[in-house]
Structure formats: C-alpha cells, structure tokens
Image (spheres, helix red, strand yellow):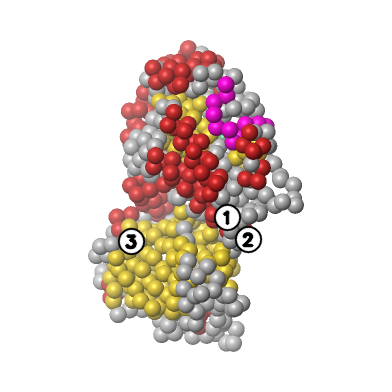
C-alpha cells in the first residue's frame, strides 16, 4: 500500500523510498522524512517541533513546512503569497482534513486559512514503481471578493536536515543557444540559489530539473534526491540552505512579474512537480525519470521512432518540389524512413523576414500544393513531416496585416522584433482558434506524419492590452493557450508525431512531452559539442526523445562514422546535403543506418548507463 495514515501523519512509500509528513504541535504541516524506505510505517520520525530562536526567528522559521505561506516570524522562501481584498498580505494555513484516493495512490491534504474562506489543497501522487512522488496544489477563493495570487509554487521538497548545512551538492543544467544542456555540479551554498526562466518558454539557459547529493555520489551509487517541474513557460527553482541547516528545493511558476486575480468561487491549479529519491546514484535517478516519461508521459509511449531526414541544413529557405524530391530520393536510398521539410515552404517565405503566420503552401514553390511532393515521398516508402512555427508572426504577413493587435505588446512601446518576428498572444482565445483552424486544415488536407513545432524567439514587452483579468496572467494563460492548441491538434490527429523545438533545445520539459514525442536538442549539430549536451539532456530525458542529426556543420568535420555514432545515441536523423555526399559516404551511411535500425530497440527502450563522461574524458560512452 503506497500511502499509510498513522498517528504521526502520512507516509508515502514507493518501491525503494519513503516520504513522511505530519502536523506538529504548533499545528503546522511539517515534513518528516524523505529517503530510503523504512521497514514499518511507524518507523518514520515524528513531525519536528522546533522552538523559536531569540526574538529574530519564530518556530515557523525552523519548521520544515510542506507548503509554507508568507506569514509569521519567518523569512525562508515561501510557496504561497497572496493579497486579500482588504489588503492583508499573509496566509495562516492549518490542516482541515485529508483524503486518500485512487486506490491509495493519491493523498489530498486540505488546508484552510484561519480567517478568510480560502482553501489550499496539496495533492501528492505516488508513482510506486518509479520511486517518484508528484505534487501540485489547488487554490480556491470561497470568499465573495477577489484576491490576488502573487506566488503559487507547486512544491517545496525537503532534504534530510544537516545541522552543519554544508554537505549538499546541486546538479543543474544551464547553457544558451547552441550550447544548451551543460551539466553543472556545484556545492549548494547557504542562502538561496535561484534558477529560472523569464523568457515565456522553458529556455535554453536553465532547465527546471535538479539533483542533489552529499557531494560523494557517482553515476552508479550514492544517494540522490532529484526532481523537475512540468511547465513550459516562466518557472523558478529556489534551492535554499537555511542558517539552521535545513535544505529545501522549491519549484513552481515564476513569481517574477506574476499576478493572478482569483475571483470569488474560482480555483487555480499549479503545474505539477515530480521528485524522487534513489540510493543508486545519478544513473539511478535518470533511469527512474526515463522509465516514467516513456510509460506515463509521452504521447506514443515506447513506440520506436523512425530514422528521419531534415532539409534545413541542406536547403535552408530554398525549398521547392524538385529540390526536395531530389533530396528525398537520396534519403530513401540510405534507408531513411521519414522525410521532414523544414522552413521555407509556406506563403511568402523566402527568408526570415516574411511569411510567418500564413500557413498555406507557397504557390510559387508548390503550384499544386504539398500533395505531389508528399505522394512522391510516400512512393519512396517514407513518411512526410513538416516544419511550422505557429506562435510567431512576421509583420510582413497577411495575418499581421489583418490582426496587428494579436501580438504580445504594450500599445505605447515599440514592438521589439527578434529574427524579424513578433509573438502571437496565445492567451487570447481568438488567436488559439485561428491556429487550431489553420493547422487542423493543414493536417487534414495532407498526409503529414510528423510536425516539427518551432519557436524562435523569447518575449519582450509582455503586454496584453485587453486582458480580461490582470494582464500579468499572460505568463500562465499563454502557456495554457499553447497546450490547448497543441492538445486539440493531438486529439484530432493522434497518429502524428510532434517534435518540440525552440531554436534547438529552448522548450523541453515534462509538460511539453505530453504533446511532443521528440525534442530538437540544439541547433549545434557538431558532434564534439553535442556529446556534453547529450550527457546533460540524458539526466532527465530518455534517448527516445532526443533527436540527433548527422550533418556537415562546421568548416571541418570529423569522420562520418563518429558523427553517426554520436547521433545513434538518440533518435537518429540525417541533416546534411545528400546531393554533396560521395558514393563512398552514402554507402557508409547506408550501413550505419541499417546498424542503427538493428540496435534501435535497445537505444530507444533500454536502460541507459552513462559509462564515461565527456566532461572528464577525451571520449564518452553510454
Ligand atoms: C530554428 C530551428 C532549426 C530550423 C530553423 C528554421 O533555428 O532550430 O532547426 O528549423 O529554425 O528557420
């Protein structure tokens, strides 16, 4: 039974881990334990009852609260900050009751404010075989006046208390465009270490994932506490070591520039956070996430992904029926199974200054639509895939000329362009409906098996002039709008495989993987640069999501076999100009693709072991 209710509170047990919480004598919902599973539910320690510390720190400052609100003599990072209609700005939450549901896999703890009709429900779901616990929060305003949420995080995860407060090490992923997914392993400093995105997407710069150990764990052994947030917009991670030696990691929506008006009778649900404990080292942590993602998250689960060809690095914007047909013939001869036409195919698109927003084939390049090219590709025995960038618009497009008010902007400010494009405000239902109609038509009228969904800039001037609520709700409503558009298309076209791309790896997280089976890890396809990125990416995501192309990127490039071997660690693709490859190169590629197909079930479905890190060795092995 994964959830036990005892006199001391609640115990959540997975295959190898235990997590306990309970109410202490001060009435606070406190964390009790997270670590190796103990023999009996009564073995877990009771909720701690700390006292205050002089006049400067109350008992609450020293209590590891499961979901601290901002109040009291307490200065740690809280999870919840609100302003009530009368201007009061703190919350006093106490446990009102709890339910265990869904065959003992979900615990809901109901908290209520001591004065206002305001309820917060903490949800815990136990994923027993994966040693993972999922947490999220529902916040309900039962008052007759609106209130404002200023921070509503998903979870605070507590590590075992270490009075010296010096022993933990934080592993995280950081980087930038062309250099994403760099694994950093650093001692966790006292105070707050904050990682975040303010870019409207998950971002190339940090990923909402962490792993914490005591500084001695290795790939194959040692305790690791790890977790992630399932959200594709602005997020925050605060890893805090208090002056009393308590270490905790909070994850949730970024409260930077965030506000949410919660009207009477309304509820707000946070994104979900997932975390786990293992004694099997960093590989053990990754394998648990990989299995969970393959079994519980990905739209097509453990289905094997096809070897693909992508036209971008060969033809850039210069696509037409003849040129793509010639590449497709070469690709099919190598054993490629899916041919993806990248940017440049739609109305008015000759370079990056025009066309985004007008999702119909360019009549000059495709006078009879996409059908003849798709038929040719299907005759060659391959599926057809297509690139789109639905959230974007060029000012030189029919869509922008018709709806200049549909973009994110402040009316009195210039609209800053990046790559000559602006961002459609997907918080608006009319924009969502337009995209659903345009993309649904594209998918319904053409035999498209794969969509590469791109997003090539970050936000500026985050205004929403006619917002029905607080305009700062944009940060959340945009992402919810994206999920609605993408989710509707998925429902209507369930066989289509989607790839999430944002100029490379700018949008990869546990939430987007409910919509996309694959991720474009980076626009940098040079294999030596790719190795550390693949190591970082694999901390969290399984190889079956990691699209990796063999290209001719760079002034010089290493042997073809090395390029293939690096890409064969994920979902193999080819992105080079095949018309330039020699007979010998094509013969070698044909053999390597055949080899990949033989080992693909192991690469995509197997347990991944990181044997040699490219950070520590001149070579890498997985
Ligand atoms: C982004 C993607 C590339 C390619 C281009 C097309 O940069 O990451 O793979 O699709 O857009 O404009």
Residue 126's image quarter? bottom left
| Residue of label 3 | 126
Residue 40 vs 127, above or below: the answer is: below
Which quadrant is home to the N terminus?
bottom left
CA gap between label 3 and label 2 equals: 33 Å
Q: Nearer the viewer, residue 300 or 394?
A: 394
> Magenta stretch: dominant SS?
loop
The percent position of residue 426, horizontal first and vertical second, equals: 56, 48
* Residue 490 in sight: yes
Residue 378's image quarter? top left
> In terms of sequence position, does the residue under pointer 3 or pointer 1 come before the other?
3
Q: Which residue is painted at 39% across and 60% down in the image?
A: 134
Query: Residue 256 — which label?
Result: none
CA gap between label 3 and label 1 equals: 29 Å
Q: Residues within 10 Å of mark 2 (few under 14, many from 20)?
A: some
| Residue of label 2 | 257
Residue 57's image quarter? bottom right
The percent position of residue 552, horizontal first and vertical second, equals: 56, 24
Query: Where ligand 1 lies, by quadrant?
Result: top right
Q: Nearer the viewer, residue 395 or 195?
A: 395
The percent position of residue 363, horizontal first and vertical second, equals: 57, 21
């Amino acid at each position: 039974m994964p959830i036990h209710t005892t006199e001391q509170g609640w115990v959540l047990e997975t295959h190898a881990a235990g997590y306990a919480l309970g109410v202490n004598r001060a009435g606070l919902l406190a964390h009790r334990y997270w670590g190796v599973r103990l023999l009996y539910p009564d073995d877990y320690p009771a909720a701690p009852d700390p006292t205050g510390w002089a006049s400067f720190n109350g008992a609450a400052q020293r209590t590891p609260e499961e979901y601290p609100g901002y109040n009291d003599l307490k200065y740690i990072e809280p999870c919840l900050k609100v302003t009530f209609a009368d201007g009061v700005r703190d919350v006093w939450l106490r446990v009102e009751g709890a339910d265990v549901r869904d065959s003992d896999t979900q615990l809901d703890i109901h908290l209520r404010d001591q004065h206002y009709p305001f309820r917060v429900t903490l949800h815990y779901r136990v994923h027993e075989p994966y040693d993972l616990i999922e947490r999220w929060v529902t916040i309900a305003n039962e008052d007759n006046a609106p209130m404002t949420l200023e921070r509503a995080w998903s979870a605070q995860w507590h590590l075992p208390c270490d009075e010296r407060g010096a022993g933990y090490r934080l592993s995280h992923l950081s980087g930038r465009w062309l250099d994403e997914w760099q694994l950093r392993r650093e001692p966790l400093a006292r105070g707050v270490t904050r990682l975040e995105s303010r870019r409207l997407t998950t971002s190339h710069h940090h990923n909402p994932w962490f792993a914490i150990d005591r500084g001695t764990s290795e790939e194959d052994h040692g305790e690791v506490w790890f977790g992630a947030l399932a959200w594709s917009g602005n997020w925050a991670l605060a890893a805090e070591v208090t002056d009393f030696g308590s270490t905790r990691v909070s994850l949730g929506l970024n409260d930077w520039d965030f506000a949410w008006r919660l009207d009477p009778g309304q509820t707000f649900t946070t994104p979900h956070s997932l975390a786990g404990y293992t004694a099997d080292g960093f590989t053990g942590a990754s394998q648990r996430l990989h299995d969970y993602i393959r079994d519980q998250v990905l739209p097509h689960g453990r289905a094997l992904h096809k070897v693909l060809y992508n036209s971008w690095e060969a033809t850039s914007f210069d696509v037409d029926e003849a040129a793509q047909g010639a590449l497709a013939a070469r690709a099919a001869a190598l054993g490629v199974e899916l041919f993806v036409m990248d940017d440049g195919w739609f109305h008015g698109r000759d370079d990056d200054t025009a066309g985004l927003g007008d999702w119909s084939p360019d009549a000059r390049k495709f006078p009879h639509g996409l059908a003849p090219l798709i038929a040719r590709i299907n005759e060659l025995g391959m599926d057809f895939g297509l690139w789109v960038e639905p959230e974007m618009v060029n000012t030189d497009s029919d869509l922008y000329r018709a709806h200049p008010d549909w973009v994110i902007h402040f009316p009195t400010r210039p609209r800053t362009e990046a790559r000559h494009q602006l961002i459609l405000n997907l918080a608006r239902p009319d924009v969502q409906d337009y995209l659903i109609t345009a993309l649904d038509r594209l998918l319904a009228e053409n035999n498209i098996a794969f969509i590469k969904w791109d997003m090539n800039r970050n936000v500026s001037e985050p205004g929403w002039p006619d917002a029905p609520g607080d305009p700062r709700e944009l940060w959340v409503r945009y992402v919810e709008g994206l999920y609605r558009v993408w989710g509707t298309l998925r429902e209507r076209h369930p066989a289509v495989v989607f790839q999430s791309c944002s100029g490379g790896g700018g949008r990869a997280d546990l939430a987007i993987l409910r919509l996309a089976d694959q991720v474009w890890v980076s626009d940098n396809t040079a294999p030596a640069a790719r190795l550390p990125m693949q190591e970082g990416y694999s901390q969290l995501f399984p190889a079956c999501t990691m699209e990796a192309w063999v290209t001719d990127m760079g002034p010089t490039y290493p042997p073809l076999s090395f390029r293939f071997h690096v890409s064969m660690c994920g979902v193999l693709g080819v992105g080079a100009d095949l018309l330039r490859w020699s007979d010998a190169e094509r013969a070698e590629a044909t053999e390597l693709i055949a080899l990949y197909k033989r080992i693909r079930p192991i690469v995509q479905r197997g347990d991944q072991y990181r044997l040699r890190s490219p950070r520590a060795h001149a070579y890498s092995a997985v």
